[in-house]
Image (tube, rainbow, N blue to C red):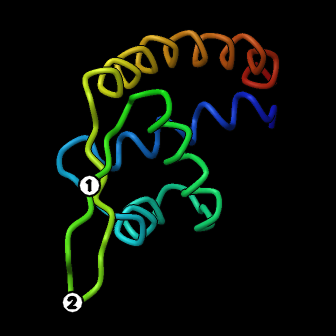
Amino acid sequence: MDIQLKRGLLDVCVLAAIKNEDSYGYKMLKDMKPYVEMSESTLYTILKRLETAEMLTVRSAEHGGRLRKYYHITRAGLNRIEEFRGDWKEIVAIYRFVTREEAGQ
């Protein structure tokens, strides 16, 4: 898969993981696991990139005597998910075009 396309898809997956409630890294990995496998290092790279792009914010809170980082989606992050939904329609149309000959066989 094209690396830029994959990167964009994974960014949206991470945003979707925190769309309805703030979350932390391990929980996000667990929530996404049925849909996409992602390493911790990949997740934290994406989280940093999304924070820099102001698509999420980070706060620290104590949990079990340790600090845990919680991530919260911003308006820009929600907008990115909406953009993706529009992009997805185009991606599906392209997929249908590319596979149209296979469907007729």
Up the image or down, 26 lies above or below 71; here it is below
Q: Nearer the viewer, residue 64 or 20?
A: 64
Q: Amino acid at mark 1?
A: Arg
Up the image or down, 3 lies above or below 91; here it is below
Residue beneath disc 1: 59
Give percent across and percent down for residue 61: 20, 68
Q: Nearer the viewer, residue 41 or 80?
A: 41
In which quarter of the view is residue 83 placed?
top left
Up the image or down, 33 lies above or below 58; here it is below
Residue at 40% x, 28% y is: 54
Whole-number angstrom distance, CA of label 1 to CA of label 2? 16 Å
Residue at 20% x, 77% y is: 62
On screen, residue 9 versus residue 14, left or right, reads: right
Give percent across and percent down for residue 33: 48, 65
On screen, residue 85 versus residue 35, left or right, reads: left
Residue 64, label in figure: 2
Give percent across and percent down for residue 16: 35, 41
Q: Amino acid at mark 2?
A: Gly
On screen, residue 13 versus residue 19, left or right, reads: right
> Mark 1 falls on what kind of element?
strand
Q: Residues within 10 Å of mark 1 (few under 14, many from 20)?
A: few
On screen, residue 40 versus residue 21, left or right, reads: right
In which quadrant will I find the N terminus? Answer: top right
